[in-house]
Image (cartoon, rainbow, N blue to C red):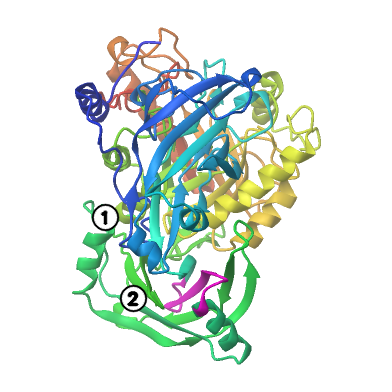
């Protein structure tokens, strides 16, 4: 393939040529929903090696060179450009310099990985200490015991990666070793930010914020974590036994931090000091449960009783696509201080005056005009070349007339959802698909015809739907629940999309029940495209080729109709494409004919609104490899629509 670069990638490429050892890459704070002032970004040059599985699993004595983290070795911006094979290991190495002063003060050191595809084995000072399976979800390692054991000023960190890509049942999205058509270059290894932070011995591990916008109430569920050996935690446990509780302070502020220049927690802290407090809790909170941490037996998880605050009626402002108002909050727990944000908003399905079910935002009907977003770049693949690339795509789609993005079978770093929160872009979040090799004749070609003929199929055909492995079913179910737990804090997300076009689909009704139990505040698209099992909140259909009609729905008295994919019109501009292949759903020779076809099809969809259509999703944000059906070219340099 021809290599393309975005404008951000070109700038980074030039910096790479200079050979800067301290090259700063994606330095923005990676977890804006829970910020601290202790943050060290570990992106940059790491040692790497690629070895054959037959050569054994011994940590390499010699490395091949340098790789720019967090770009996968398959991406041009990694500086490597090697396609990892299922019989290979990818090794990363670097040193982590320790702050002995903070450790001596009793603080803990946490190492965070945004995502590593597909299985990561973590070694500290030559000892394997953790294994994580799943290429799209974050994980954390408490380095404190290893830092205290070590007499050196730094820890030796090694990460070994195994990625079998589409040769197994693991979640993989659009990745395929033999790329082409609708499938893209498989990638591996670290592809999201790696960072570390020092936290007090007793610290906040998670905060779940649920806003009841109808009544102006906000519920905070706090999970704290501490080391069993500390006197502080021992004292807390004794207090728990006597119901003395744990002192917690929560403050909600009147103004929002929803601006583009929030990059570090230091800027956040400076802003907080000048804000007006509109609601406050300052009291002891009962610890309702104490459980030994599963990832580190030296730690205990402390589940606190829920804390509910009420926002004064005069200060209640609702989040919308036009005015995406966010509230800041601050939580103090002992010596720990974290900052986050939330919004007052609600997504529901309600009947309009004609008795037709509609999607509603804050109880007002809204037609969600959306666009499919795969989240790929030619230079970084699944990793953006810069944080600004997210803003460019989001604002570009808003300027085109879209106010909803369907994030297609990929989980982005939290920065993406933060920008959608503050810029007023609604998100439908897909679960990442897995399963064995797909039978395209069944899940694509035959399904397209059956969908047009409105012939329903069930999801019991495990072999045809590539879901025979029970271990794969259990793994996907767990990852679905982890995805919801990770992202439900973001007000921009309106919908969970459980399955897409039958790819690895199974037990749909059961999965919808589990998803609803995990989060009952959002809508659920159970089966986008076809293989609808009559569950979830949406009668969701794809139509790329046939006249647009709303399919019959046996649950028509309960579900909303959504055209969850359409369009996909192709126009390839040679100097902005990576291959000569053209993949799409209708080919055009210039922007004028493309725009005309797009507007004609769009109007065809809009005419279905009186009949009950509640949302549409046009394919797609940008070209990707063979697919040249984007609104932007792959390098984001030409806007075609």
Q: Decide if residue 393 is on the left or right side of residue 74.
A: left
Quadrant of the frame with the N terminus: top left
**Secondary structure beneath label 2:** loop
Vertical arrangement, residue 244 with respect to residue 614, above or below: below
Vertical arrangement, residue 543 with respect to residue 243, above or below: above
Q: Residue most toward the front?
A: 151
Q: Quadrant of residue 434?
A: top right
The residue that label 2 is drawn on is 316
The residue that label 1 is drawn on is 264
Residue 328's label in the rendered image is none
Q: Residue at x 26, y 38 (%)?
A: 24
Q: Residue at x 23, y 79 (%)?
A: 276
Quadrant of the frame with the C terminus: top left
Q: Is residue 257 visible?
A: yes
- Residue 303 lies within the magenta run: no
Q: Decide if residue 322 is on the left or right side of residue 213.
A: left
Q: Is residue 408 visible?
A: no
Q: Which residues are magenta?
A: 211-231
**Along the viewing direction, whichever of 407 and 148 lies nearer the viewer:** 148
Q: Quadrant of residue 256?
A: bottom left
**Along the viewing direction, whichever of 463 and 414 lies nearer the viewer:** 414
- Residue 225 lies within the magenta run: yes
């Amino acid at each position: 393939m021809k290599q393309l670069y975005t404008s951000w990638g070109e700038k980074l490429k030039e910096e790479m040529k200079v050979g800067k050892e301290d090259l700063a890459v994606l330095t923005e704070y990676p977890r804006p929903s829970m910020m601290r002032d202790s943050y060290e970004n570990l992106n940059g040059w790491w040692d790497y090696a690629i070895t054959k599985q037959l050569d054994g699993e011994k940590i390499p004595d010699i490395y091949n060179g340098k790789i720019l983290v967090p770009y996968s070795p398959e991406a041009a911006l990694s500086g490597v450009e090697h396609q990892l094979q299922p019989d290979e290991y990818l090794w990363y190495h670097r040193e982590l310099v320790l702050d002995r002063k903070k450790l001596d003060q009793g603080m803990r050191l946490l190492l965070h990985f945004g995502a590593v595809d597909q299985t990561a084995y973590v070694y500290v000072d030559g000892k394997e200490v953790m294994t994580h399976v799943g290429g799209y979800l974050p994980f954390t390692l408490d380095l404190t015991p290893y830092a205290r054991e070590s007499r050196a000023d730094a820890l030796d960190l090694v990460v070994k990666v195994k990625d079998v890509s589409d040769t197994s049942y693991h979640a993989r999205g659009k990745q395929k070793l033999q790329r082409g058509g609708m499938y893209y270059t498989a990638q591996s290894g670290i592809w999201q930010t790696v960072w570390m932070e020092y936290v007090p011995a007793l610290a906040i591990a998670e905060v779940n914020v649920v806003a009841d916008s109808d009544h102006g109430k906000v519920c905070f569920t706090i999970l704290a974590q501490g080391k069993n050996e500390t006197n502080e935690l021992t004292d807390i446990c004794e207090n728990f036994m006597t119901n003395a509780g744990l002192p917690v302070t929560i403050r909600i502020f009147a103004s929002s931090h929803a601006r583009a220049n929030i990059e570090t927690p230091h800027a956040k802290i400076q802003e907080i000091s000048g804000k007006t407090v509109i609601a406050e809790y300052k009291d002891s909170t009962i610890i309702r449960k104490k459980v030994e941490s599963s990832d580190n037996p030296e730690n205990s998880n402390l589940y606190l009783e829920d804390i509910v605050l009420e926002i004064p009626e005069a200060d209640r402002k609702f989040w919308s696509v036009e005015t995406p108002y966010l509230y800041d909050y601050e939580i103090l727990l002992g010596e720990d201080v974290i900052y986050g944000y939330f919004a007052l908003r609600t997504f529901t399905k309600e009947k309009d005056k004609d008795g037709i079910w509609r999607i509603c935002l804050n109880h007002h009907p809204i037609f969600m005009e959306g666009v499919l977003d795969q989240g790929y770049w030619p230079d970084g693949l699944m990793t953006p070349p810069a944080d600004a690339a997210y803003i460019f795509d989001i604002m570009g789609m808003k300027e085109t007339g879209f106010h909803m993005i369907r994030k297609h079978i990929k989980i982005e770093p939290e920065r993406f959802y933060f920008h959608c929160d503050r810029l007023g872009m609604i998100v439908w979040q897909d679960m990442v698909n897995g399963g064995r090799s797909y039978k395209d004749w069944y899940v694509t070609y035959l399904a397209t015809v059956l969908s047009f003929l409105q012939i329903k199929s069930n999801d019991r055909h495990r072999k045809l739907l590539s879901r025979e492995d029970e271990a794969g079913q259990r793994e996907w179910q767990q990852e679905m629940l982890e995805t919801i737990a990770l992202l439900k804090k973001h007000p921009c997300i309106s919908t969970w999309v459980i399955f897409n076009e039958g790819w690895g689909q199974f037990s749909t009704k059961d999965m919808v029940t589990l998803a609803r139990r995990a989060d009952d505040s959002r809508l659920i698209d159970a089966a986008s495209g076809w293989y609808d099992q009559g569950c979830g909140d949406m009668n969701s259909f794809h139509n790329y080729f046939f006249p647009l009609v709303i399919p019959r729905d046996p649950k028509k008295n309960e579900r909303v109709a959504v055209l969850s994919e359409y369009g996909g019109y192709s126009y390839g501009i040679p100097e902005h494409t990576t291959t000569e292949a053209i993949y799409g759903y209708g080919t055009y020779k210039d922007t004028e004919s493309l725009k005309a076809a797009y507007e004609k099809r769009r109007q065809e969809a809009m005419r279905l609104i009186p009949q009950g259509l509640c949302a549409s999703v046009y394919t797609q944000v940008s070209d990707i490899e063979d697919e040249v059906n984007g609104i932007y070219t792959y390098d984001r340099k030409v806007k075609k629509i």
